[in-house]
Amino acid sequence: MVDDKYLVTRTRADAAERASKAWRMRVAGGGWDDIAKALGMKGGAPAAYRAVKNYFGKVPQVDREMLREIARQRGERLWLRAAAAVEEAPSPAAIRAAVAVLERVAKLDGLDAPSRVEVSPEAADFMAVIDAAARGMGLVLPVEADIFDAEYVDADEVEEDQSSS
């Protein structure tokens, strides 16, 4: 006779293993329906999703570093195919595909030099845009006093005047 406690423990272990496999497949890019079919889960995508949710308590968020590593691996596989295609038949389409893979991998790993965009509108143009936006929202911008439109007074002269008084 089989012990009921053994069956329950074994069933939980099987469910945990299937949920863990389902999550790994999901992280690797598999769809819930494909995962359910691969693991022989009845009920399709909802069953696979529930298995992962029930095992982990919620569907976990994928770590960014894990996603980067997966993207690197995919990029490497794509590069091998693209490079082979270029060697077999160096067509413009094959070369463009290979270059696209290289560009994506370089961006992923931060190998490209950072691109710099410099925007420097004239102050008057900038204020006109801000004023137009404010008027479009029914607002009126306050007029600011020109703090630099004043008479320059030397501090030493002020001190002398104060000490002589």
Image: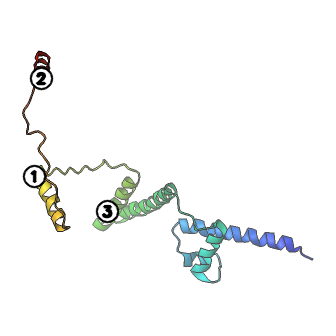
Query: For the image shown, how many numbered marks are present on the structure?
Result: 3
Which residue position is annotated with label 3?
95
Can residue 38 be seen here? The reply is: no
Residue 146 location (% of width, % of height) = 11, 44
The answer to whether residue 162 shows anywhere in this view is yes
Mark 2 neighbour class, 10 Å CA radius: few under 14, some 14 to 19, many 20 or more? few
Task: Identify which residue, 121 or 149, lies in the foreground.
Answer: 149
Q: As shown in the figure, which amino acid type bears the numbered disc 3? A: Ile
Name the outermost residue toward the top.
Answer: 164
Q: Is residue 162 left or right of residue 19?
A: left
Q: CA distance from mark 2 to mark 3?
A: 76 Å
Name the foreground residue: 104 vs 137: 137
Mark 1–mark 2 Cα distance, whole angstroms, equals 36 Å
Residue toward you, 91 or 141:
141
Q: Residue drawn 10% across and 24% down?
A: 154
Kindly indicate whether the residue at mark 2 contacts the one at mark 1 (C-beta within 8 angstroms): no
* Amino acid on which disc 1 is placed: Ala
Is disc 1 placed on a helix, strand or loop?
A: helix
Upstream in the sequence, badge 1 or badge 3?
3
**Mark 1 to mark 3: distance in Å?**
48 Å
> In this figure, which residue is indicated by the disc labeled 2?
158
Q: Which mark is residue 124?
A: 1
Residue 6 in the image: x percent, y percent?
85, 70
- For the C terminus, the image quarter is top left
* Circle 3 residues within 10 Å: few <14, some 14–19, many ≥20: some
Q: Which residue is at 30% across, 67% downward?
A: 93
Q: Amino acid at mark 2?
A: Val
Question: Disc 2 on helix, strand or loop?
Answer: helix
14 horizontally vs 57: left or right: right
Are the residues tagged 2 and 3 within 8 Å (C-beta)? no
